[in-house]
Amino acid sequence: QVRLIESGGGSVQTGGSLRLSCEASGRTFRMAALGWFRQAPGQERDAVALFRWSGGGPFYADSVKGRFTISRHKTQNMVYLQMNSLKSEDTAVYYCAAKSVGSDIYLFGQGTQVTVSS
């Protein structure tokens, strides 16, 4: 089992920036994907940015391309989400997410609130 702990959420004005961090622990050698989802009130939880070990570059949702950047520190099992030019529609609970090899199910951390106000 992989455990995920997020940090770095908060409140910011439109156009501002925030950086989210996530530490993965446990059976991290079995991870097939690691990254971030978000869920706004009344909406589904959707992928925002992901590293996938199957190949290719990072995945980004169309709504965040050019504004968000996912990065990771391999040896420390840390993944980050740098969020720039934030918009009110980015307001959501952001979840660190990981998927293990052979599984179609993402595991999530406890989530961290990001609120963008004008």
Image (cartoon, rainbow, N blue to C red):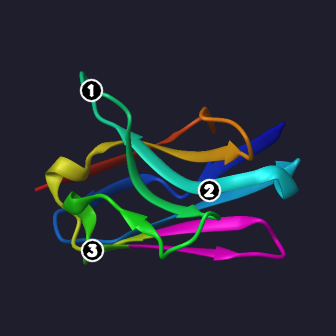
The residue at 68%/36% (across/down) is 103
Give the residue at x 50% y 60%: 50
Q: What is the quadrant of the N terminus in the image? A: top right
Q: Which residue sits at x=44%, y=46%?
A: 37
Please tell me which residue is depicted at 25% across the width and 27% down the height of the picture: 43
On screen, 118 above or below 108? below
Residue 23 shown left or right of residue 48 in the figure: right
Q: Which mark sits nearer the N-terminus, 2 or 3? A: 2
- Residue behind mark 3: 67
Residue placed under numbered mark 1 in the picture: 41
Q: Main secondary structure of the magenta part?
A: strand
Mark 1 neighbour density, 10 Å: few (under 14) some (14–19) many (20 or more): few
Please tell me whether mark 2 or mark 3 is closer to you in this view: 2
Give the residues drawn in magenta, as a range: 69-81
Give yes or no for residue 70 being in the magenta stretch.
Answer: yes
Q: Judge the density around disc 3: few (<14), some (14-19), many (≥20) Cα neighbours within 10 Å.
A: some
Asked whether residue 26 is drawn in magenta, I would say no
Tell me the number on the disc at residue 34.
2
**Would you place residue 69 above or below residue 78 in this image?**
below
* Front: mark 2 or 1: 2
Residue 27 coordinates in the image, percent (x, y): 88, 47
